[in-house]
Each structure stands twice: as structure tokens, then as C-alpha cells.
Amino acid sequence: MSSQPPSAQSNSGTTGTPRGPPPGEKKVLTKAERRELQERQRAEKAAKQAASSSSKPAAAKQQGQSQAAKPKGKQQEETSSHHRHTSSKSGKEIIDAVKLAQSESGAPSLDSLRIFSHFGLPKPMASIGAGIKGEIHPAVRKLGLQFADFRITGANARCIATLTVFKTVIQDYVTPQGTTLSRHLMTHLSPQISYLVAARPMSMSMGNAIRYLKYEISILSIDLPEQDAKDFLCDRIDTFIRERVTVADQVIQSLAMEKIQDGDVILTYAKSSVVEKTLLSASSEGKQFSVMVVDSRPLSEGKQLLQSLTEANIPTTYALISSLPTVLATVSTVLLGTHALHSNGALYSRSGTALVAMMAKAQNVPVLVCCETYKFSDGILLDSFMKNELAPLDLSAPPVQSPPSNKLQVVNPLYDLTPHTNITAVVTEVGLIPASAVPTVLSRALQGAT
């Protein structure tokens, strides 16, 4: 008989039995086995937690009795060791403990207004500019405090005030040795801009004006004498204010006045400088119309517009936004101001504007938006929750009383977003355009600049 080799005999003897995993490797579990293992581990963990929680009160009582019987030196030693143990806790455990203590005491938690944490929050006057490196010009400090105190409001007013102050900063600037004005001036202006942003979030009008100033600084010749360069920049600032704000407002006034006829009732919301100038100009030309000023908190800016119109002998009615459905029945045209107009045609303006435009469209009342093109933005905003600013509570008239519960927070968003579908036309210095034509105007302006 022929004999098989030992290797063959061992292989033939194990063909009928399943082979296990190689030594040193873990067994591959099936899905059912993994589920069973996880459930068993959870049950063991729950049992351990229940046993430890039931033993804690008795252990704490016994520890308290033994602590009272121990000498004072021994207690201090154990107390110090306990402090060392607690100081080694993770940051998350400490934060959780603080939150628990605040919730038990009724104080506002660390998550207070967390959902609005990306909004521009009002800051105390003393904390404005904290952490900003660089010397802040006194005129910039004064302007920043006026911004924070809401003494200067409105996109045009803030933009003009910022550029006017920057003229003073530029004239007082002295170029350091070993550098040029065109290369170092922006380094000097950066902390000034940061201070203004710390006082209040930058408006779209300010942002576009500052970008314009940066461009003018970048194209300065390094061979230009320092004083001539300063005079050139101040002249360019005056040109921007004259062409993009003053003259633009005059063109918008003439175009918007064509839409006002004798006997019309014009409704406007809050206060817009260009809308105010339009109404005053139409009245000075002899047109007979009346105005409905709708207003709302927190700023109640419509009261200032009411005073201006009544001093010009324009028949004016003041109403709160809660009465809007009633007063819309007699309105002929709605004129609105603008904080910014985005590429998707969305109007970013004072909080309450979206409600006025929506209800006016439902009543088939034309909605005209007065906006200078320097307020156009190439960005897209989908709702007012993506970007906004909160007004301080003391700006409300009468002031908002403190909530009865410390867990209740009063929020005053300053702006909302109106979709382009609720806007009939936008009155600009380039003519009456649909809100969806903002990208076209921006692209043509960019081509003209190049």
C-alpha cells in the first residue's frame, strides 16, 4: 500500500470540520451577536450606575460623620486633595456644573440668546475697542460712541460720517520713516475701522465706501508728495459722497416724484432720508397728497419723519404697524427705504418692512423701493436670521421693562428681509429697475471701473 505524506493526511482529516480563526485574531461576530453583546454591556453599565447611585447617600452621610470626628489638620489635608481632584476635571464638566448652578439659582444660563449669538449684539460703552491694537484717533472714538449710542442712524448718515472722519484721520496722519503713504496708510486705518465695527456692525454702505477708499489708496503713486497724496484722497472722498450719495439722491427724488399724483396717499415705514427728501420735494413743487407714516419699535424713527413732514405742512397720519391692515385700504403707493439690496433681489431694511411690503402686495398696492446703487451687495441673503443686529432695550420708547423671569430674554432685531417678489420696482440713480436686476447693475459698474 502506498502511504500518503503527513501533510496530505492532516489535510484530508480536517476537510469535514470548520476551520476557526487563526491564532491571535478576533472572531468575526455576526450582526445578531454584536447586538446581543451591546445589550449585555448596556445592562451591566446600568446596573453599576444604579448600585453606585444607591450607595452615594449612605457613603456621603458616613463621610460627613467621619469628617466631623477627624482633627482639623487632617480635614484641611483631605480638603486640599479634593480640590486637586476637582481641578483636574475636564472643561466640559466645569461648564456643565456652572450651568446647573445658574439654572438652580434662576440666573441667565450660559446659553442665553445662544441662537442669536451670531447677531450683532449691543456692547457696553466701556468695552468698545477692547483688544484692538494700534492708536485710535479721537475723532474715530467720538464717532464710534455715537454709533453705539444710536445718535447717528441710517445707512447714508453713517457712511457720510465715517468718510468725513476718515478725512480728518488722513490729514493728521504722518508717514513713518522708511515707508510710503500708499503702503502704510491702510495699516494706520485698520484699527480705526475695527473700532467702528466694534461699536456697531458695519453697514453695507460703509463697507462699500471703505472698499472704495482702499482702492484709491492702493493706486497712489509712491513718488507723490505726502500732502498731495492726502489732498488727493480727501478729494476722492468728497467725490464719492457727492456722486454716489448726494447726486444719486437727487436723481432718485426726481424719478420717485413722477409716481406721486395729486390726491394720492403715500405710505412709508419708519424713516428713510431719501424717502423724506422725495416727499418734501414733491410738496415743494405744489403736489397735493397726504402721507401715512407707519412705525414700530424699537427705534420708532417714524416720529422724526412725522415732525419733519408736519413742519412742511404735509397732511400726515401716524400709525403703528399693528393697524396696517386698516390703513392700507386707502393707500395709493408705498415708498420704502433701503439698508442694502442683495444680488437675489432681497431687500434688507428696518424690521417691519417685509410685513408692509407683503401686505401691500396682497392689497395690489405698488411698492417702490428707493435705493442708491452703492448700497447694492454682490452677496445673497436668504432670510434675516443669517445676518442681523440687536438693538439695546433702552432704545425703545417707552423703555422695555425687565422681564419678570431671568430666564426670559427680550430681543429687538433691527432688520428683516423682503423677497423681490413683493417689490414692484427699485428707484435708483440709473432708473427704475426690477429688484432682480441688481447683478446686472453690479457687473456693469465693475466693467466701468476696469
Image: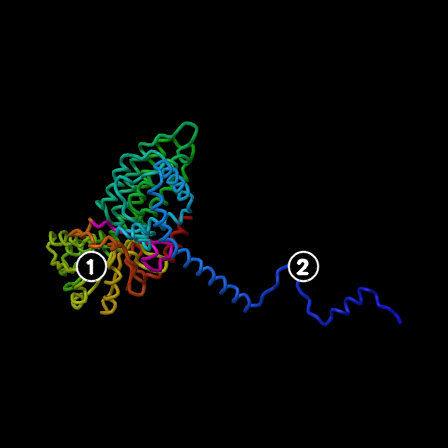
Q: Where on the picture, by quarter, is residue 324?
A: bottom left
The answer to whether residue 221 is above or below residue 399 is above
Return the x and y of residue 209 as percentages of the image width and height: 33, 45
The answer to whether residue 260 is above or below residue 236 is below
* Mark 1 lies on residue: 268
- Predominant SS along the magenta part: loop
Residue that lies at the very extreme toward the top in this rendered image: 177
Tag 1: residue type?
Thr
Return the x and y of residue 425 as percentages of the image width and height: 29, 62
Q: Where on the picture, by quarter, is residue 133?
A: top left
The colour style of the image is rainbow
Taking the spot 23% from the left edge, 42% from the top edge, the residue there is: 146
Question: Magenta part of the protein: which range?
Answer: 373-393
Q: Is mark 2 on a helix, strand or loop?
A: loop
* Mark 2 lies on residue: 23
Return the x and y of residue 55 as percentages of the image width and height: 39, 55
Q: What element carries label 1?
A: strand
Front position in the image: 419 or 13: 13
Does the stretch in magenta take in 376? yes
Front position in the image: 331 or 53: 53
> Does residue 108 appear in this view?
yes
Return the x and y of residue 78 as percentages of the image width and height: 39, 40
Q: Residues within 10 Å of mark 1 (few under 14, many from 20)?
A: many
The answer to whether residue 204 is above or below residue 232 is below
- Residue 298 left/right relative to 120: left
Q: Which of marks 1 and 2 is in front?
A: 2
Tag 2: residue type?
Pro
Disc with the residue nearer the chain's start (1 vs 2): 2
